[in-house]
């Protein structure tokens, strides 16, 4: 071989590696909204690439919404075993095999991954597993697992890198190697005593689930009530539920320092209203908020600015400060629900097609998947009072819903806020079995602008949970 050829070969190879690949759309981060964007635009014939560091389909089908609800369902089954005598199902004993619980979850995730990959193949969207970062305006570099580098440019770019569990700078926390929701969903043993830092959605759902599997559980929260922003009847109901299920709560408490290691023995020292308190457990779960994944991905090289909280700065059309670059999902400060990420996709889809779809005034449903569930949409009483909005209150206990009696699930209540001078529904809250399903009917009525009387006078199938909307909306006088 000629000496000059030998010298040229590496150079030619490097040139091939670093050649720019041009796409109609490049997506950084494969969250649910991003996945739908990839499939939709690729299905329309556009050249689309999705760059994802680890999870096919993002966090929801792998480490968040769906796996957690899978575990919650296993825990619900365990609770029915413990209540077996109530239903006439006599069992001398039973035990929890967490490896089986985990494997059921893993099987679901694997099936979802296969389905997602099949959709990528069918639509023609390219899924690239690697670490991506911006190297210039609408230009990204991807490092693959084998070290190969690819460079992609997009006529448009969507950022959907999501968030991660926040670890506060508490002395000893990092050394304790605590669980986040990711590791908690991979447990193959029932923790003897789980200490949970944080009383938000993730902390509450996993606390109840692990308690039902047999763990002693203690929840630490800096506020005076669990989900302290909710109405008082909601926070009271949650407190009562946790007391009934034997979950300890340490409220108005700030963690001072931690020692030991999660999985063997861990000690948590808290300051509770000026008094020091020491908690000792076997496992530690941190569920104290989320942090955006915006570091070390070259946003500054692309002209993408962050807001004061570290999230990508977007306008109501979800455009970033960089022309042709959009951000969707949690990294854009969107409420941390997959269903809102899906709507973010719709906003970007319509705007790329020349529309003017905005995120302003969206009607966003919230659901906490404890048992009973907490579901709400529209205004709470706290919010209505703060905004000086007058309302009529409709409220009934779940004991008035006949289907709840057939299920032996009469805990909780339904309530709704209706305009004082009209019959429009301003807000709805349910703390009830399958509350999210009940809420959907009210949400539909709110979207359609129907008066509450349409739900009050509807012919609902009997016996169903949604049938409870008739007694709910008959619980206060009408205007006429």
Image: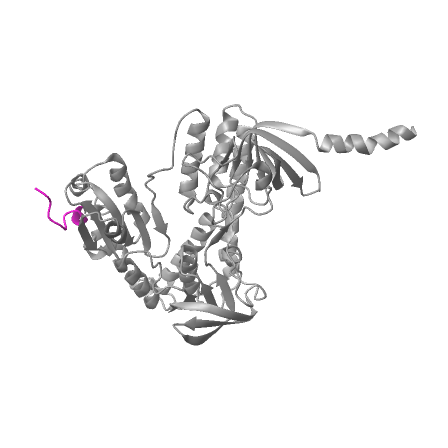
On the image, the x and y values in percent for residue 221 come to: 41, 64
Residue closest to the eye, 446 or 15: 15
Asked if residue 468 is among those painted magenta in the image, a careful observer would answer no
* Residue 193 in sight from this viewpoint: no
On the image, the x and y values in percent for residue 408 come to: 27, 58
Using the image, determine if residue 277 lies above or below residue 393. Answer: below
**Left or right: residue 151 compared with residue 5:** left
According to the image, what is the colour scheme of the structure?
Answer: one colour
**Left or right: residue 445 compared with residue 361:** left
Residue closest to the eye, 203 or 404: 203
On the image, the x and y values in percent for residue 297 come to: 59, 43
Asked if residue 471 is among those painted magenta in the image, a careful observer would answer yes
Using the image, determine if residue 296 lies above or below residue 267. Answer: above
Magenta segment: 470-480
Rendered image quadrant of residue 358: top left
Q: Residue furthest left?
A: 480
**Chief SS of the magenta region:** loop
Using the image, determine if residue 227 lies above or below residue 468. Answer: below
The residue at 40%/64% (across/down) is 222
The residue at 70%/39% (across/down) is 148
**Left or right: residue 165 compared with residue 147:** left
Q: Residue furthest right?
A: 2
On the image, the x and y values in percent for residue 446 come to: 25, 39
């Amino acid at each position: 071989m000629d000496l000059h050829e030998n010298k040229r070969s590496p150079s030619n190879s490097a040139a091939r590696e670093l050649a720019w690949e041009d796409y109609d759309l490049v997506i950084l981060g494969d969250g649910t909204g991003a996945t739908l964007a990839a499939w939709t635009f690729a299905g329309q014939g556009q050249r689309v690439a999705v760059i994802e560091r680890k999870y096919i389909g993002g966090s929801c089908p792998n480490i968040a919404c769906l796996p957690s609800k899978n575990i919650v369902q296993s825990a619900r089954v365990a609770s029915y075993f413990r209540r077996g005598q109530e239903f006439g199902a006599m069992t001398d004993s039973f035990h929890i095999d967490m490896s089986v619980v985990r494997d059921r979850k893993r099987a679901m995730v694997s099936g979802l991954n296969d389905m997602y990959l099949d959709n990528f193949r069918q639509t023609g969207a390219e899924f690239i597993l690697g670490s991506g970062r911006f190297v210039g305006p609408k230009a990204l570099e991807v490092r693959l697992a084998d070290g190969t580098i690819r460079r992609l440019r997009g006529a448009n770019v969507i950022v959907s890198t999501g968030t991660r569990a926040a670890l506060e700078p508490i002395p000893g926390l990092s050394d304790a190697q605590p669980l986040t929701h990711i590791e908690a969903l991979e447990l193959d043993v029932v923790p003897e005593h789980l200490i949970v830092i944080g009383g938000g959605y993730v902390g509450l759902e996993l606390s109840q689930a692990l308690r039902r599997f047999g763990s002693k559980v203690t929840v630490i929260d800096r506020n005076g009530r669990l989900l302290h922003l909710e109405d008082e009847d909601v926070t009271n109901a949650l407190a009562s539920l946790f007391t009934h299920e034997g979950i300890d709560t340490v409220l108005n408490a700030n963690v001072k320092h931690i020692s030991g290691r999660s999985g063997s023995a861990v000690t948590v020292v808290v300051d509770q209203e000026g008094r020091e308190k020491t908690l000792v457990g076997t496992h530690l779960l941190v569920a104290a908020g989320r942090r955006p994944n915006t570091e070390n991905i070259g946003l500054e090289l692309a002209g993408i600015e962050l807001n004061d909280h570290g999230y990508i700065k977007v306008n109501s059309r979800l455009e970033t400060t960089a022309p042709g670059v959009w951000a969707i999902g949690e990294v854009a400060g969107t409420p941390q629900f997959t269903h809102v990420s899906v709507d973010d996709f719709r906003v970007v889809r319509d705007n790329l097609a020349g529309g003017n779809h905005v995120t302003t005034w969206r009607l966003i449903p919230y659901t906490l998947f404890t048992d009973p569930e907490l579901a709400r949409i529209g205004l709470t009483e706290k919010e209505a009072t703060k905004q000086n909005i007058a309302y009529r209150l409709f409220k009934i206990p779940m004991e008035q819903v006949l289907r709840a009696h057939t299920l032996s699930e009469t805990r909780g209540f339904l309530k709704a806020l209706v305009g004082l001078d009209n019959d429009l529904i301003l807000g709805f809250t349910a703390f009830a079995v399958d509350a999210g399903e009940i809420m959907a009917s009210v949400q539909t009525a709110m979207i359609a602008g129907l008066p509450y009387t349409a739900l009050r006078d509807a012919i609902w199938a009997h016996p169903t949970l949604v049938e409870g909307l008739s007694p709910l909306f008959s619980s206060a006088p009408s205007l006429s």
